[in-house]
Amino acid sequence: MQGVGFRPFVYRNAVALGLSGHVYNDNQGVLVEVEGPAPAVAELCRVVTEAPPPLSRVDAVEATELAPTGRDLGFVIRTSADEGPAAVPVSVDTGTCDDCLADIRDRANRRYRYPFTNCTNCGPRYTIVRSVPYDRPTTTMATFTMCDDCQREYDDPADRRFHAQPNACPACGPRLLLWTSTGQRLAEGDEALRRGTRMLAEGRVLAVKGIGGFHLATDATSEDAVAELRRRKARDEKPFAVMVPDLEAARRLCLLDAATEAALASPRRPIVLAPRRPGAAVATGVAPGLPELGLLLPYSPLHHLLLEEVGRPLVMTSGNRSDEPIAHDDSDAFDRLGPLVDALLTHDRAIHIRCDDTVLRRTPARLQLVRRSRGYAPEPLPLPTSAHRQVLAVGAELKNTVAVAKDTMVVASHHLGDLEHPATSSAFLQAIHHLCHLYGVTPEVVAHDLHPEYLSTKWALDADLPTLAVQHHHAHVASCLAEHEFVGPVLGVAFDGLGLGLDGTLWGGEFLVADLSRFTRVGHLRALPLPGGAAAIRQPWRMALAWVNESMGHDDAALVGPELDERWPAVLGLVRSGGPHAPLTTSAGRLFDAVSALLGVRRTVSYEGQAAIELEALARTVPLEQAPVYGTLEVDRSEGMAVLDPRPLVARVVEERRLGAPAPVVAAGFHRALGEATVELAASLAHEHGLDTVALSGGVFQNARLTDVVEEGLRGRGLTVLVHSAVPPNDGGISIGQAAVAALGNHQG
Ligand code: ZN
Ligand code: ZN
Ligand code: FE
């Protein structure tokens, strides 16, 4: 991998051991030829194997004996001019290393308090690369000419900054700028930092330009500051991420185990959602109604300096308004964020690729990626077998990512967002171009979703290349297979929001017999009308009404209706008449929405999935063993298809509420019953089809309680269960599944 300092590392060790020879990258990896005393050669092998540089990944070390030349010509690093195209052209963006941190804290160091300090072990990479090979002129650092001191470091193989492309110092590198929201310059350099810090300490809201884009920052402990930020960001209730200076501060806010701490402190620096401590000292408005907090540690020198000086946790939320893409260039930031902030703390190093923070969630069973972006993209994932052809996969519509596949790898882009926003669609085009260019992929086929209205599908069909439509839930299951480097077949359980099915209805509660070539739908949740189509996503009460009508009939629906929403008569009419405004759906996500609304948790939502997330949180307040048993669901097999019927369960939920059962208990009972019914059906379908492995995918499997019940139940029946952790179970993983199907599957024609 370039930019991780592997060759200089070998150089330093070889020189120290008195070995002669050379090191270079070829497209397979790093090749070292050395000559010298046998113990020194053995020691070099040991160091490379056991103590490689922090950002590198050593998959294997092979050693071969060569005839000695008898000449000592010293040790050299052969330059990239000798090399073929690299398998991994650019590393991920990496959090500031301890050595650089020491530099910026050392008064005597020329980089004291310099916010753009970096070295071969840390700093921006993917977000500053315009082209390959990765070299200073192909990055957004090209406009800065290194001073003599920086150049000397850059040229010295023994220096930590040897060939560190973003190398910079206060004399020659980027500088900070502080602006008013209307674009008047207030200060620059260290003065900008001091004034910006002071504003944050006073509870103001700042837009702060980081590595992959702008954050909106404010004092996370101030009720007023957080409420003001929320007000300015518009109605959205999405939780804000909180940046803390170090692990000790993180421990004061959340309950952290060793694995969670390791993830937080890793150089990838993701946001980690972890259970919050009772009474954690952050404002209520940070994560309203949620038992978890999204924490992250500083990942640029600027973050470290801000956090140290403000001395309080800071909200660091994406610099955008509700669902829009994060702002990453300065003029866009002034346009879109100016009205939301008191000042903008920017800098003059351009961000070439917008890259949101990655989000991981700590569940009882695992750390799961929910959004795979900065620090992870564009790192390739291995494929289970070699690709038949070079593939571009364009993903779904929401939480879009794109991916390319070739040889034995699939490379997914950073998180792009919801394609309905014009700014997202331009990021979508940029990501396609960039990934193909970086990895030298000339797509022979474009894989896309079945849904004709997705912008990604439309783009694929216009691309003038052979195309392959991959059904949404097949792609989900395939993404899980790809993550586990498994070709199948498996029994795939795909529970999510909505995806277009082969029969033209909206699927989302699916049992598929699938491998990477094909799938057969063998079961699903019972279908019912989705009243108002997309409106039902924002208004879970609509699904509640539809499910009560389906389960208990019109009279009960009319009884429940007035509690749900005053518009209930019109919506009940829509449910009962069917037609184009109430398409059929088998969605599991919408069933969770319905129950959430019935329990009074969420009748309308401000972001997709909110109702289900809050329902899960409620259910998890009741230990699983104490969850009531509501009986198993029936399965209708009359038409050659196993139809799982939640009607008795929905009726029970309504009954329990009428009898006054507490909402958390009913939520726990619902999770348990649906989970156990899923286990029953998946196990029997796996058995019928001679399968011993079940893959769980789709956004609903972000639900930790449901996943726990299903996973444990299936394991208890001797089945192997594949669950996501390195690929998001939600639509962010769809491009990876599409790419795996198109690259590895056998498709006729
Ligand atoms: Zn460093
Ligand atoms: Zn310099
Ligand atoms: Fe989906």
Image (cartoon, rainbow, N blue to C red):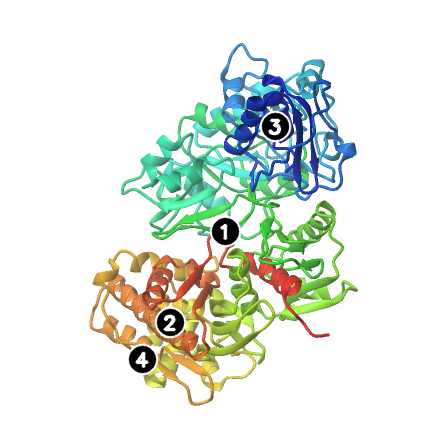
Q: Quadrant of residue 735?
A: bottom right
Camera-side residue of 567 and 591:
591
Left or right of 332? Residue 717 is left
Disc 2 target residue: 678
Camera-side residue of 401 and 181:
401
Look at the image and tell me whether residue 53 can be seen. no
Image: 116 above or below 731: above
Q: Is mark 4 within 8 Å of ligand 3?
A: no
Is there a contact, CB below 8 Å, between mark 3 and mark 4? no
Q: Which mark is residue 648?
A: 4
Disc 3 target residue: 120
The amino acid on which the numbered mark 1 sits, given as a three-letter code, is: Ala
Q: Helix or strand or loop: what does disc 1 sit on?
A: loop
The amino acid on which the numbered mark 2 sits, given as a three-letter code, is: Thr
Q: Helix or strand or loop: what does disc 3 sit on?
A: loop
Q: Nearer the viewer, mark 1 or mark 4?
A: 1
Q: Nearer the viewer, mark 2 or mark 4?
A: 2
Rendered residue at 35%/31% (across/down): 248
Look at the image and tell me whether residue 358 can be seen. yes
Earlier in the chain: of badge 3 and badge 4, it is 3
The amino acid on which the numbered mark 4 sits, given as a three-letter code, is: Pro
Give the distance between the C-alpha atoms of the residues marked 2 and 4, in whole angstroms: 15 Å
Rendered residue at 58%/38% (across/down): 61
Q: Quadrant of residue 605?
A: bottom left
Give the distance between the C-alpha atoms of the residues marked 3 and 1, in whole angstroms: 26 Å
The amino acid on which the numbered mark 3 sits, given as a three-letter code, is: Thr
Earlier in the chain: of badge 2 and badge 4, it is 4
Give the distance between the C-alpha atoms of the residues marked 2 and 1, in whole angstroms: 24 Å
